[in-house]
Every structure is written in C-alpha cells, then in structure tokens.
Image: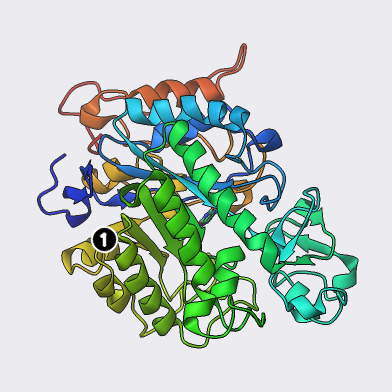
Amino acid sequence: MATENIPLLTPYKMGRFNLSHRIVLPPLTRNRANNNIPQPHAIEYYSQRATSGGLIISEANGACDISLRCPNMPGIWTKEQVEAWKPVVNAVHNKGGIFFCQIWHPGRVSDYTTQKWWFIGREEDQDDKDTTPEQLKLEDNVSDNYNEKWFFIDREPKDQAYKGTTPEKLKLEDIPQIINDYRAAARNAIDAGFDGVEILGANGYLIDKLMKDEANDRTDQYSGSLENRCRLALEVVEAVAEEIGADRTAIKLSPYDDYKGTTGDSTPEALGLYMANALTNLGILYLHVTEPRMIKVGDDYITPRSLLPIKKAFNGTFIASGGYNKYDGDKAIEESYADLVSFGRLFLANPDLPKRFEINAPLNKHERSTFYIQDPVVGIVLAPLTRSRSYNNVPQRHAALYYSQRATNGGFLITEATAVSNTALGYAH
Ligand SMILES: Cc1cc2nc3c(=O)[nH]c(=O)nc-3n(C[C@H](O)[C@H](O)[C@H](O)COP(=O)(O)O)c2cc1C
C-alpha cells in the first residue's frame, strides 16, 4: 500500500503481532449464528474484511449457555461452536489477518430462552422482584410497564422483540462460576484458532453494569468503591490472562456510555483511569475504549471529554472506537491519541475499508435495517457495489460475487461502464 501520508495505513507492532495498518474491525453482533453456531456465511463476512496484517475482532460470543442476549448470537462454550469457528478463523488467517474473539455475558439482558437472567441488584431484594423497577427497564424503548416483560433489541424494528422474564439477582456464590465460564470460553477461542480474546466490558452488559455506580446497587465486595465495582472486570481479565496469556488478552470498555439508560457512571474519567492502571499492572495486550461522544451506539455528541488520559495511563496498545471517519482516524493516529482505531458501521458497509481509505474511494453508507436480520447475504457480503472497485482497472474477485448475486436464471445484467482503452478512464479503479 502507498501509505506514507495516511497515518491509518502505517504499520504498528502490537505485542507479538505485526500489523500492517491501524484500521480495526470492532465486534459487530450480526445475529446470524443459527442456534448459536457460527454459520458458513461468517467465512465470507470475516474474510472479506480481513487484510494481511489487519486486526479484526469477532462479534460477541456467549461464554456459556446462559450468556446470550438473543437467539442466533454465536457462542464459544461447546465443542460444536469451536469446530464451527475453525473454518472462519482459517479463512481470516489465510488472508494474513489477525483475529480476536470477543466473549461476553450480557447479564440482565439475556434472552428469555436461556435459563436465567443475571441481575446485579441487591441480594437482599432477591425475593422481591418488584423493588427496583428502574433497573428492569432494560432499554429506552422497553415497555413502560415492565411487568409485560417485553423488550426490544436496540432501536431496531419492533418485530425483533423478544419476550423476557424477570431477571434473577446475581448471587455472590455464582460469581466464581461466571469467571470460570470466561476462562473456559477463552481457552475454547484459542482452540478454535483465534489469536486472542477480547472481553466485552462495555455497553451496559454484566461487567460494565457492575463497574457503573448508577447501576450497581449491591452491598457486597462488588459494590461501592471503584476498586470493588471494577473487581469482577479485573477478576475476569486475570482469569483469562492466566489461561491464554496476558499477551493474547484484551478488553473493551465504555466508561462514558449510558447504554441502557440506567448504567452511567458519575465519574467516568476516574473509572477509566482506574481500569487503565489496573490493566497495565496485569500486562494485557490491548485496551479498546468507546469514545465519550458515543453515549449509545450511533450517538455523536459534542463533548470536551477525551480518552487521552486513559490512553496515557495504559501501557499496552490502545484502540479508540466510536464515530470515526478517515479524517479523524488519521488525526488520532498522527497525534498519538490512539494506536489503532476501530470503524464499526463503516467497516460493515465497506468490507474493503482499508483499500478504500488508501485510494480515497467513495464509501457506502451502512443500512441499519440489515444489522440484525438473519439473512445470510443481505448486510453480510459486499454492500451496494457501484463502481471504482476495479483496482488498477482490473476487475476484482468481488465482482464475481457482485454480479452473480444479482444474476437469475434468464435474467439480464449489464456491467458497469468498462473503458475501451487507457485513455478512456473516468475515475481511478
Ligand atoms: C450492528 C452493531 C453491532 C455491534 N455489536 C457489538 C458487539 O457485539 N460487541 C461490542 O463490543 N460492540 C458492538 N458494537 C459496537 C461497535 O463495536 C463499535 O464500538 C461502535 O459501532 C462504534 O463504532 P462506529 O461509530 O465506527 O460504528 C456494535 C455496533 C453495531 C452498529
């Protein structure tokens, strides 16, 4: 790549991994893993976004059978899931990509079909499920009457509603099991061939909820002081690092977000700094943090808050996420604000994003309605291909996909404009 003056396209050494550029695919839940098993179309999805020396991170994977938010999210707790991930990981490795597996436990927003809903409320409230209705209000758009026990996935079409049951309170004696589930899931991820594991400690799910003082109203050693609230996060990180090595362990945090409406923190800077220092002591590979401008996914508030103090306090690789485009991604790298930048919705809509940044090609806009549908093609493979993808004026392999997707038996297709000579090119590529 001709990259000297594109900071995002400069190489970077992340521990044992030699990255050829700074553009990261962050975890993006796709809801297409039928019965929690990754499907063959995941090979297409991830390998399209893999580049030689590029870091990509899988969608969130359930760490155990009670850790799923909704049907069709992948897991990594069974042999079958490990086997199903293997060809996906191989395809990414065949392209020279570096592939981390994100593992999670959503806590109280688990799916109703799983056995339990973990909740962080007061243990003494355990038998009185109606005492903290605010905390049962899982989403902005949850029914006002929480007794209806319905909630909706983000702000997606209402037909994606899942029926829920009242969450159970998380008991102190259940915590070691949760930590062990993360440990086993991390081992499974390595067995599946992943290069490392990113723990989901962001976005209002189990680990994040405990960290945030506006959500955590326990009264035990997992509540109160920062040290206590961050205890589960650090115990999980420690267990995973012990299992697979700190040099393969990472975590994603979102100290500034208030993802579920009731999970914010009153001093997010202090929370971020505390975690950065503690993670430095644990020597993990990277820390992936959501920008303060993104209080919920999709937000882009103007804020004077910055991730820089957190970056400075952490001595591993620092990845910034949330609302980035090429311009401010380049700036973040140039100013050492971040070592790497993850691009979620842009990478979703532009599987060849690093190439597009390199040649300054037009970008597709993401199509929100395709984020979580079960279609194995729509929203998975190359999004609308219009033109300027024939690098060096030679049709690329993805053109085979593009045209054959649109071909029907007896249907009539016309190619994009194809130059008659090298003096007849309107645009590069
Ligand atoms: C469809 C969708 C699914 C997501 N799924 C996950 C996920 O599984 N795990 C996670 O940590 N973040 C998830 N996120 C957040 C992204 O990883 C990323 O941090 C966020 O989209 C901000 O980046 P962007 O502004 O470049 O899109 C998701 C975001 C979107 C849009």
Foreground pick, 386 / 138: 138
State whether residue 346 is above or below residue 214: above
User: Is residue 177 in view from this perspective?
Assistant: yes
Extreme residue toward the bottom, this view = 266
Residue at the image position 37 percent from the left and 83 percent from the top: 305
Q: Position of residue 66 (x, y in %)?
A: 71, 50
Extreme residue toward the left, this view = 4
Foreground pick, 150 / 221: 221
Q: Secondary structure at mark 1?
A: loop
- Characterize the local packing of mark 1: few (<14), some (14-19) or many (20 or more) Cα atoms within 10 angstroms: many
Q: Position of residue 122 (x, y in %)?
A: 73, 79
Foreground pick, 145 / 180: 180
Q: Is mark 1 within 8 Å of ligand 1?
A: no
Residue at the image position 56 percent from the left and 56 percent from the top: 179
User: Is residue 383 in view from this perspective?
Assistant: no
Q: Which residue is mark 1?
A: 316
Way the structure is coloured: rainbow
The type of residue carrying mark 1 is Gly
Looking at the rendered image, the quarter that the N terminus falls into is top left
Q: Could you tell whether 419 is left or right of 291 in the image?
A: left
Residue at the image position 71 percent from the left and 56 percent from the top: 110
Q: Quadrant of residue 258?
A: bottom right
Foreground pick, 2 / 150: 150
Looking at the rendered image, the quarter that the C terminus falls into is top left
Q: Position of residue 85 (x, y in %)?
A: 52, 31
Q: Quadrant of residue 376?
A: top right
Residue at the image position 15 percent from the left and 28 percent from the top: 423
Q: Could you tell whether 42 is left or right of 132 in the image?
A: left
